[in-house]
Image (cartoon, rainbow, N blue to C red):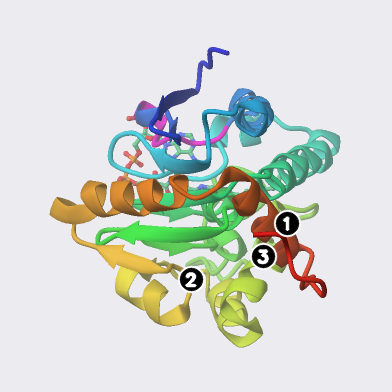
Amino acid sequence: MTYETLELKVENRVARLTLNRPKALNAMNLEMMMELRALADEMDAREDVSVVVMQGAGRAFCAGMDLKWSESLTKKDRVESNRIGQKTFNRLANMEKPLIAAVHGYVLGGALELALAADFIVAREDAQLGLPEITLSAHPPYRPKITADGDPDQPEFGGSAPGWGGLTRLPERVGIARAKEMLFTGIRLNAARALEFGLVNAVWPEAEFEKEVAELATRIGAMNLYNLRLVKELVNRRYDLVEGHPS
Ligand code: CO8
């Protein structure tokens, strides 16, 4: 299948999925959402793929929801766009094969929610990760809520909290207190702090990032595909095998 907003390369059982709207810092629009779902189906169906690495083209992993898409939404559409994001990221989280997010640059808002749908995240040293939603108003110009005129600009309808799974996936990943710190402040964590938080599994300098990601993916990709699927499903369902498995 061909994609407009994504690039896909498969080599040696490793699929590289690249968010490919670099001029907009890979911001997610409706088309990208739909393509991510189609790609998850393709990845699960392909026998030549054992592991998927998701990354961003250009200078950022992703700047979150496309603000042009967001600005075009009516209140009713906003509810629907929440559902679209939820369903898309749930589909990715439930992919049968391991999905690794390899992030750099901005990983903000919906972008972090996307990365959290992966099994785990690894980061380049320059990554900045955060859920800034609490600092944004629901409508343009998305100004910080604490403004010079003291107007908290309380949104009438939605938009002030992450809506694409981050509220559940972030506490699962980093613990509830750290998640709350991030959610209440809207801060961007640098890669080192994200490592301390347990939000990312590893941080590598730019010069080594590609090599390290490739090594990790190749190692996982070399595992037996059935076992990868089995282990992922058992972990995701919090289920341990009582009977031994045939090996
Ligand atoms: N959408 C569309 N275009 C974007 C976005 C975006 N989110 N972010 C950046 N771009 C574009 C810019 O418009 C700019 O385009 P152009 O060159 O044509 O002017 C280009 O990307 C480069 O951006 P900047 O020049 O701004 O680059 P900087 O390095 O100066 O700044 C930032 C980068 C800090 C990422 C800045 O662009 C920014 O703050 N962007 C917005 C980030 C943001 O707030 N994203 C939304 C987060 S909230 C979210 O994702 C909610 C998801 C769940 C919602 C569910 C409810 C419906």
Residue under label 1: 233
Residue under label 2: 199
Specify start and end residues of the magenta stretch as a single range: 23-28
Element marked by disc 3: helix
Q: In x, y percent, where is residue 45?
A: 67, 27
In this rendering, would 129 be left or right of 120?
left
12 to 61, vertically: above or below: above
Specify the quadrant that holds the C terminus. bottom right
Q: In x, y percent, where is residue 221?
A: 45, 45
132 to 18, vertically: above or below: below
Nearer to us in this view, 63 or 97: 97
Residue in the image at 13% along x and 52% along y: 207
Element marked by disc 1: helix
Q: Is mark 2 within 8 Å of ligand 1?
A: no
Ligand 1 quadrant?
Answer: top left
| Label 1 close to label 2 by CB (< 8 Å) | no
> Overall secondary structure of the magenta stretch?
loop
Residue in the image at 41% along x and 42% along y: 55
Nearer to us in this view, 167 or 78: 167
In this rendering, would 99 be left or right of 232?
left
Q: Of tags 1 and 2, which is closer to the observer?
A: 1
Q: Residues within 10 Å of mark 3 (few under 14, many from 20)?
A: some
Q: Earlier in the sequence, mark 1 or mark 2?
A: 2
Using the rendered view, name the quadrant where residue 41 is placed.
Answer: top right
For the question of whether residue 162 can be seen, the reply is: no
Nearer to us in this view, 172 or 136: 172
Amino acid on which the number 2 mark rests in the picture: Leu
Q: Earlier in the sequence, mark 1 or mark 3?
A: 3
Element marked by disc 2: loop
